[in-house]
Image (cartoon, rainbow, N blue to C red):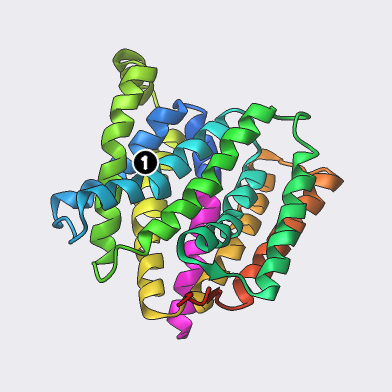
Amino acid sequence: MKPADIFLATLVAVIWGLAFVASRLALDELPPTLMTTMRFAIAAVPCLFVRKPDVSWPLLIAISATLFLGQFLAQAFGIAHGVPVGLASVIVQSQALFTIAFAVIAFGEVPTRMQTVGIAVAAVGLLMICGTVGYDFSVGAFAVLMICPVSFAVGNLLLRRARDVPMFDLFAWLCLASAVPLLALTLIVDGPQPARHALLNMSPTGVISILVIGAVSTSVAYWLWGRLLRDHTAAQVVPFALLVPFVGAAASSMVFGERFGPLRLAGMIVVIVGIAIMLLSGRSRSVPKIA
């Protein structure tokens, strides 16, 4: 990779890590459904200027419902109900574990020996984290947050079917496909008047946070990430995502004073080590077809 591309990959990871802090700040003023709606409404603005990519509506909706709507709505609910930001950033990256596991089922991709070791290590880390649930956040909040990496993983696999399309256009329309049902959900769950009141009474911090989440973290960062994956192999690009939980945890510690107990910190480190083993161990091989 060129130095410029290495810089962009690192920049995207930093943006995504800081986005967890921005999400927490926005959730102090907006309910999870409204905050997620605003995130994708802002990121969908480019749809006014770009055409829908050559992807069928069923596939577009399926990718949007998993990669974006399911992932980020679960993330918002988990953080809003007490899951620490730093921990959330680690849990989200466990999507690598689920992506490899689901690829076995969907595409017959057999993990390599080292990937299997990575899955086992990451699973142990998640179990260690589970041992800390109930002290400063509920089991229910943790269960909702776990929807995030599972949904993320399914979206990753569905995204494979959207090939040879402009990445910026695709992600803009994915955001639109998420914003529309989220708006309906917001009106049902929160109500029109409370939602309007919350938006009109946002502080400058809340406004800046939601703009950063929508315009920078969702629109620009995903576009840059898609370009990097288009121009380089996944093995070169994806490992940069390992920086996200470190940035998220460090930023949360500085902004919110988040502290990690020995078991939770050890579990977070074990998860990241397991993910690193999976991402750096090479590509899965396909199951041989039976004649």
User: Residue 259 appears in which quarter of the rendering?
Assistant: top right
Q: In the rendered structure, does residue 201 fall within the stretch colored magenta?
A: no
As rendered, which of 245 and 92 lies closer to the eye? 92
As rendered, which of 36 and 122 lies closer to the eye? 122
> Which image quarter holds the C terminus?
bottom left
User: Residue 146 appears in which quarter of the rendering?
Assistant: top right
Say whether residue 46 is left or right of residue 136. Answer: left
Instruction: Indicate the position of residue 199 as horizontal and vertical percent values.
Output: 35, 25
Residue at 76% in and 46% down: 127
Say whether residue 180 is left or right of residue 54. Answer: right
Residues drawn in magenta: 1-19
The image shows residue 25, relative to residue 166, as above or below, that is: above
How crowded pointer 1 is (Cα within 10 Å; few <14, some 14-19, many 20+) is rated as many
Say whether residue 236 is left or right of residue 203. Answer: right
Where does label 1 land, which residue? 39
Residue at 24% in and 51% down: 173
The image shows residue 249, relative to residue 2, as above or below, that is: above
Instruction: Indicate the position of residue 235 as horizontal and vertical percent values.
Output: 53, 77
Residue at 44% in and 41% down: 70
Instruction: Indicate the position of residue 153 as horizontal and vertical percent values.
Output: 50, 54
As rendered, which of 12 and 280 lies closer to the eye? 280
